[in-house]
Amino acid sequence: MAKKVVATLKQTTGQEFAKVIRMERSSKTGAYTFKESIVPNAEVKEFLAKK
């Protein structure tokens, strides 16, 4: 599955995209969860700055 995602991110169709993984802590249990998202390269810093 990872190969398919990487292959689609390398297409030259205008914007370039990056797969971003952010680690968040649950307020109920205290366990960590991971949020994955595909965002344009211009919005990576904004995505990681969100809480």
Image (cartoon, grey):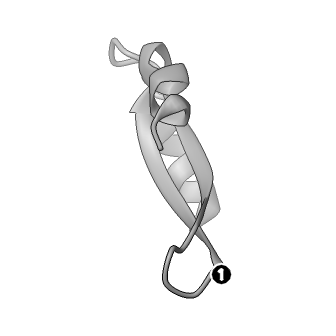
Looking at the image, residue 30 sits to the left or right of residue 28; the answer is: right
Pinpoint residue 33: horizontal percent, then vertical percent: 59, 72
Q: Which residue is mark 1?
A: 31
* Other-residue count near label 1 (Cα within 10 Å), few / some / many at <14 / 14–19 / ≥20: few
Image height check: is 22 above or below 25? above
Q: Is residue 32 visible?
A: yes
Pinpoint residue 16: horizontal percent, then vertical percent: 46, 19
Q: Is residue 10 visible?
A: no
Image height check: is 38 above or below 44? below
Pinpoint residue 9: horizontal percent, then vertical percent: 50, 36
Pinpoint residue 2: horizontal percent, then vertical percent: 62, 61
Residue in the picture at 60% in, 51% down: 22
21 and 16: which is toward the camera? 21
Q: Residue furthest bottom?
A: 29
Looking at the image, residue 15 sits to the left or right of residue 24; the answer is: left
Residue in the picture at 33% in, 12% down: 14
31 and 12: which is toward the camera? 31
Residue in the picture at 46% in, 23% down: 46
Image height check: is 21 above or below 18? below
25 and 21: which is toward the camera? 25
